[in-house]
Image: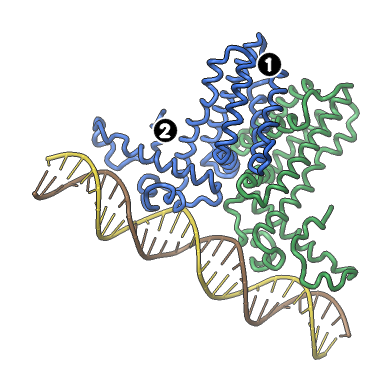
Chain colours: A green, B blue, C yellow, D brown
Amino acid sequence: MAEQLLATKMRKDAPARRAARPPVDKFNARRVELAEAALATLAELGYARTSLREIAQKSEFTHGVLHYYFTDKFDLICCSVRYYKAKCVTRYDQITATARNREELLEGFLDKLGETIRTEAHMHRLWYDLRAQALFEGAFRDDVTAIDKSLEDMVWRIMSRYADLGGKQPAVSPEALYALFDGLFQKYLLRHLSDDDRAVTELQAELRHLLPMIG
Amino acid sequence: MAEQLLATKMRKDAPARRAARPPVDKFNARRVELAEAALATLAELGYARTSLREIAQKSEFTHGVLHYYFTDKFDLICCSVRYYKAKCVTRYDQITATARNREELLEGFLDKLGETIRTEAHMHRLWYDLRAQALFEGAFRDDVTAIDKSLEDMVWRIMSRYADLGGKQPAVSPEALYALFDGLFQKYLLRHLSDDDRAVTELQAELRHLLPMIG
DNA sequence: CGATTTTCTTGACGATTGACCAAATTTATT
DNA sequence: AATAAATTTGGTCAATCGTCAAGAAAATCG
């Protein structure tokens, strides 16, 4: 899972012993544990109201330990964002790989989409929050851009397979397709979080109507 | 311009004299003035780092006056958001009304689009920031949803006219069209703010290729 | 077991925040 | 001009922020 990318802070004595086996990435394991607490806090409160003390409270440690594992708040949040990425981009791969016809792929995709918007709405809103922060804070831009690309690829894999199962080619570019999906998802996520019970169903209906037109 | 919508706080003696002519909305005029300062601050710093003192510093007043015209920070920001709306949604109406053929409309639209993303990038990123905040803070949701609808209508007016000039009908729903435009704009705005000089040109190229396919 | 290192807690710091208020000032009314 | 009302100032308040350092606790090792 490319833990190496998460290690932006090194323990002081790391270079001394390179082959020390068991505790090699106990350090990084704890970083990931704290990053998870950070993600949970960010998803609940949003970037603007997330403090280090709140994050620590969601973990099993006190606030001081965050500065032992991370150089500062940016380091922690960037680590969280990178960790977040890995959990998202393979969400539909199983369906894409196993679906045997267009119907199966479409309905499998819409099911999974509905499930994630219902059960992980807070994580999705966090993504849109962080992407907006990247418009202001340059420190987030590389990570956000990379995640955007991963999501674009993910959407393209689904659409390519869908078109392929119909012997067609997608009628739009990968970036236009992702823009469309992303824009729709964002809109219906807001409706869902506003307690609109029809939001998920109508998003699925919109996509069910849209996909056959695209590929 | 429906200033009434901006008046969420009333002066104490307002009900006493209804027909008092000149100072009727001097109160609201100052609210708007402060809302403009708030918008400028939000566009520069983002929601997360915008404080009342920073806003006051961008105005010609001190921070205490904000609590004279607004009940609290939410009241001020909501007022700013409503004020923001009026400035955006008519941006392309002139071109839509005067264009005499598809080419003229398309190029006029793309010109205006390029101009606004270049000169008003900070205001655009503020919009995406506030829309993300609405995912967390219910107090923003009604205003954000209303603005989203206004923007959807704006995009639909352009597309309808464009299709009409070609004797066609738009091939997608208004919401799908807006989702597509919004998603693309958001992506290229990030690129533009990341000092990617090709961002605006490539956004225009993408849309130049896309519009003829839609209507 | 004792020594050493790693990990974690605790409390403090300077700065900043939104909110609030009394007094000073300006503007309008009589 | 005198009075009243509206507006603005500037300071205070309690709360909270990120950061840091000193030392307790736990783990590791000779």
Q: Is residue A29 left or right of residue A187?
A: right
Q: Quadrant of residue B126?
A: top right
Q: On screen, A151 above or below B61? A: above
Q: Amino acid at mark 1?
A: Gly
Q: Do the residues at discs 2 and 1 belong to one chain?
A: yes
Q: Between residues A126 and B103, which one lies in front from this camera angle?
A: B103
* Distance in Å between CA atoms under marks 2 and 1: 36 Å
Q: Which numbered disc flags the more N-terminal residue, 2 or 1?
A: 2
Q: Quadrant of residue A15?
A: bottom right
Mark 1 closeness class: few <14, some 14–19, many ≥20 residues within 10 Å:
some
List x then y, in percent, for residue A204: 72, 29
Q: Quadrant of the C terminus of chain A?
A: top right
Furthest-top residue in this view: B167
Secondary structure of the residue carrying tag 1 is loop
Can residue B60 be seen here?
Answer: yes
Image point 78% across, 41% down: which residue? A150
Image point 79% across, 48% down: which residue? A86
Per the image, the residue denoted by label 1 is B215
List x then y, in percent, for residue C1: 82, 90
List x then y, in percent, for residue B7: 39, 37
Per the image, the residue denoted by label 2 is B5
Question: Looking at the image, is mark 2 or mark 1 nearer the viewer?
Answer: 1
